[in-house]
């Protein structure tokens, strides 16, 4: 019995710490002594059943515990911020509890340590969703509508402004906007992927087509550079005879965009 109480205390502290950590992460709030307040919450949870409280007092006690822990664990400058922190803490607590309740309905009673495993999985899933969404928001912040006009063709794609793209054409000294093969083939459908990848484009009538060397650590390669009649970026930027570069680096998998804009364009 003593071992089970100790295990329950440890798991409660662990779960409370995860809930505090997620609240801190989602709201970008710094925690103060999280383990201490996680322990306090765990002690209240273990002691409260001894008083045989009815359902209404249990709810009030849980609300009081949430208010107490959040007020001790976080700093806040206004009551509005305080209630936002409390609300987030309560929602995450319900998420943890709801996941365990759903699992119990699915498979029946399970050992106490499974509660910690479920809590850990919820913690990992929420963090993955959070960081993926933050990455998407950062990409969207630097994404622009791009229109390419060349030889009567008009292509529209989303482009990503990469401040690290400082590539210039060695001949024209113009900035180079990188594109994937998908975009390139819409302009030059007669060029196959193999020929483009193997740099066999000498007889393909690519406008001002030439290769420039890209130096990287320990090695060097070259990419195909060519011009298009006009490049429109956003609502108010237009560039005549813009330079595009065909890239096989796979940047579209990282940014989700098929055009990598040059830092000089903004």
Image (spheres, rainbow, N blue to C red):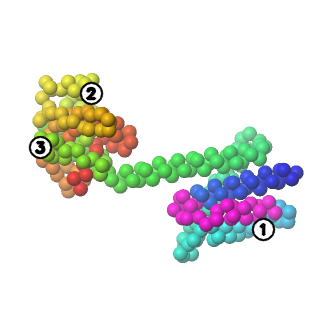
For this view, does 188 lie left or right of residue 94?
A: left
Disc 2 element: helix
The picture places residue 190, in percent across and down from the top left corner, at: 20, 26
Circle 3 sits in a helix, a strand or a loop, which is it? loop
Q: Nearer the viewer, mark 1 or mark 2?
A: 2
Task: Determine the CA span between mark 2 and mark 3.
Answer: 23 Å
Q: Which secondary structure dominates the residues rendered in magenta?
A: helix
The crowd level at tag 1 (other Cα within 10 Å; few <14, some 14-19, many 20+) is few
Task: Answer whether labels 1 and 2 touch (C-beta < 8 Å).
Answer: no
Check disc 3 and report the residue beneath it.
Answer: 172
Q: How many marks?
A: 3
The reply to whether dot 3 and dot 1 touch (C-beta < 8 Å) is: no
Residue at (38% x, 39% y) in the render: 253
* The C terminus, quarter of image: bottom left
| Mark 3 neighbour density, 10 Å: few (under 14) some (14–19) many (20 or more) | few
Query: Mark 3 vs mark 1: which is more N-terminal?
Result: 1
| Residue bearing the label numbered 1 | 57
Can residue 235 be seen here?
Answer: no
Q: Which mark is residue 247?
A: none
Describe residue 14's horizontal placement relative to residue 22 as left or right. right
Magenta range: 23-47
Q: Nearer the viewer, residue 17 or 242?
A: 17
Choose the circle earlier in sequence order: 2 or 3: 3
Q: CA distance from mark 1 to mark 2?
A: 70 Å
Q: Which residue is mark 2?
A: 197
Q: Secondary structure at mark 1?
A: helix
* Magenta-drawn stretch contains 84: no
Instruction: From the viewer's side, name the closer residue of 219 and 202.
Output: 219
Upstream in sequence: badge 1 or badge 2: 1
Query: Where is residue 108 shown, x and y percent of the image?
Result: 77, 41
Q: CA distance from mark 3 to mark 1?
A: 77 Å
Which residue is pictured at 77% across the width and 47% down the height?
A: 112
């Amino acid at each position: 019995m003593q071992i089970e109480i100790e295990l329950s205390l440890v798991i409660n502290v662990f779960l409370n710490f995860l809930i505090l950590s997620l609240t801190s992460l989602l709201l970008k709030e710094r925690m103060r002594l999280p383990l201490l307040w996680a322990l306090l919450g765990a002690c209240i949870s273990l002691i409260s059943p001894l008083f045989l409280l009815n359902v209404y007092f249990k709810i009030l006690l849980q609300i009081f515990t949430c208010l107490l822990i959040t007020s001790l664990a976080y700093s806040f400058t206004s009551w509005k911020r305080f209630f936002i922190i409390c609300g987030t803490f309560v929602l995450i607590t319900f998420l943890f509890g709801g996941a365990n309740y759903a699992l119990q309905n699915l498979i029946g009673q399970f050992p106490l340590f499974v509660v910690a495993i479920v809590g850990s999985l919820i913690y990992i899933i929420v963090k993955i969703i959070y960081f993926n969404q933050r990455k998407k928001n950062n990409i969207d912040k630097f994404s622009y509508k791009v229109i390419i006009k060349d030889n009567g063709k008009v292509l529209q794609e989303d482009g990503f402004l990469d401040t690290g793209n400082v590539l210039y054409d060695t001949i024209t000294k113009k900035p180079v906007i990188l594109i994937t093969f998908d975009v390139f083939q819409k302009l030059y459908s007669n060029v196959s992927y193999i020929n483009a990848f193997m740099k066999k484009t000498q007889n393909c009538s690519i406008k001002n087509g030439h290769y420039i060397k890209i130096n990287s650590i320990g090695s060097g390669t070259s990419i195909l550079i060519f011009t298009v009649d006009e490049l429109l970026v956003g609502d108010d930027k237009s560039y005549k005879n813009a330079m595009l570069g065909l890239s096989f680096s796979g940047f579209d998998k990282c940014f989700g965009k098929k055009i990598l804009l040059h830092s000089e364009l903004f």
